[in-house]
Amino acid sequence: MKWLRLFAIGYMFLSSLKAVAAQDYIAPPMVAIPGGQFIMGSDTGGGFKVFPHPAHAVKVKTFQLSQYEVTVTEFRKFVEETKHKTRTECWKRKPGTREIEWVPGSWDLPQYAPSEFHPVMCVGMDDALAYMSWLSKKTGQKYRLPTEAEWEYAARAGSKDNYFFGNNEKELCQYANVLDKSGKRAFERDIGLTWNGVDCDDAAEYTSVVGRYKPNAFGLFDMIGNVGELVEDCEHLDYHGAPADGSAWMTNCGQQTFLFGLIKASPKIIHRGGNYGGAGIRLFDRGHTGINNSSSLGEGFRIALDASDTPLAQEHRVTTELFLKDLLLAQQKTKRPL
């Protein structure tokens, strides 16, 4: 009967509202990435401290990757419940130079977190791991960082070009928040630094609300630019000896030495995708950071799941749906001009 159906719908709605009110976390929207084989890296050059060669075949298993970079609002819920303490300093560009300096700063300061839907930064690997452990307990999932091979495979989405949309650098501003005309003007104004970027305008000076640019063929947003994304692998200067099965490269992660041992560098981890301050970032370009460095230069993370993880329960999916609705409103408020 009609009234019973209406009653059932109303009950489900009220139950959902009650569940949402009780939930102090967000289960991020995830994208299923089909397994396959691809050529990782490039032999065409590129890289300064970590190199993308040699190009090599890698087979990746099916997995899931979050559709967006982890946002301020997602991370805030974690901090508010757990009282997790992040560092009170982070790396920032030194005015008038191309150097960086360690200054007071935190992930939740307005200049680093302009809105709840910007990607969280000024966080390190320890913060990311603590967040994922907490979220896993909340949802029953086993969230983790993607491996470097998984990241590039997902970012390419089948592309063999420099970018997932082709090779035309001037099209980057449609797909990514990178160092462009807007960024160049901001750098000159704020830190007195002339740094040429891509010859287009993405309408964002620094980081932007996630998902404002066109996605790749897998439906993933901001795989290029905005913030660099931590992966599970520790730093290796190139791909000689890298695993071919898509797993994280976690061996020989010790302290590195240069110039016959005269210079020693602490162990580091890899991040991928570049950031708002990088120009012409290609899919094979690599970056690195200290294991627990926090940085306002544009380093954040997105999270992954194994394909074998149990499906997300409805009570958790409700938080995803509400997040997506709120994100859409935030995107509309900062809609890019055509």
Image: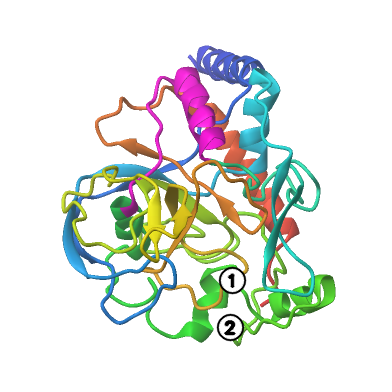
Q: Is residue 27 magenta?
A: no
Local crowd size for mark 1, using a 10 Å CA cut-off: few (<14), some (14–19), many (≥20): many
Looking at the picture, which amino acid does disc 1 mark? Val
- Specify whether 320 is left or right of 207: left
How far apart are labels 2 and 1 at the CA level? 8 Å
- Specify whether 188 is left or right of 298: right
Most prominent secondary structure in the magenta stretch? helix
Q: Is residue 131 magenta?
A: yes
What residue does disc 1 label? 178
Task: Residue 99: give x, y in percent of width and height.
Answer: 67, 68
Looking at the picture, which amino acid does disc 2 mark? Val
Task: Residue 299: give x, y in percent of width and height.
Answer: 57, 53
The quadrant the C terminus occupies is: bottom right
Q: Is residue 289 above or below residue 43?
A: above
- In depth, the one of 67 and 38 nearer the eye is 38
- In depth, the one of 90 and 35 nearer the eye is 90
Q: Is residue 272 visible?
A: no
Task: Residue 85: give x, y in percent of width and height.
Answer: 67, 27
What residue does disc 2 label? 198
Q: Element under label 2?
A: loop
Give the total number of marks visible in the rendering.
2
Task: Residue 179: give x, y in percent of width and height.
Answer: 62, 74
- Specify whether 226 is left or right of 110: left
Q: Is residue 255 visible?
A: yes
Q: Is residue 209 above or below residue 310?
A: below
Q: Which residue shows up at 55% across the image and 74% down it?
A: 174
Q: How is the image coloured?
A: rainbow
Q: Which residue shows up at 52% across the image and 28% down it?
A: 130
The magenta span reads 125-148
- Specify whether 232 is left or right of 202: left
Cβ atoms under marks 2 and 1 closer than 8 Å: yes
Q: Element under label 1?
A: loop
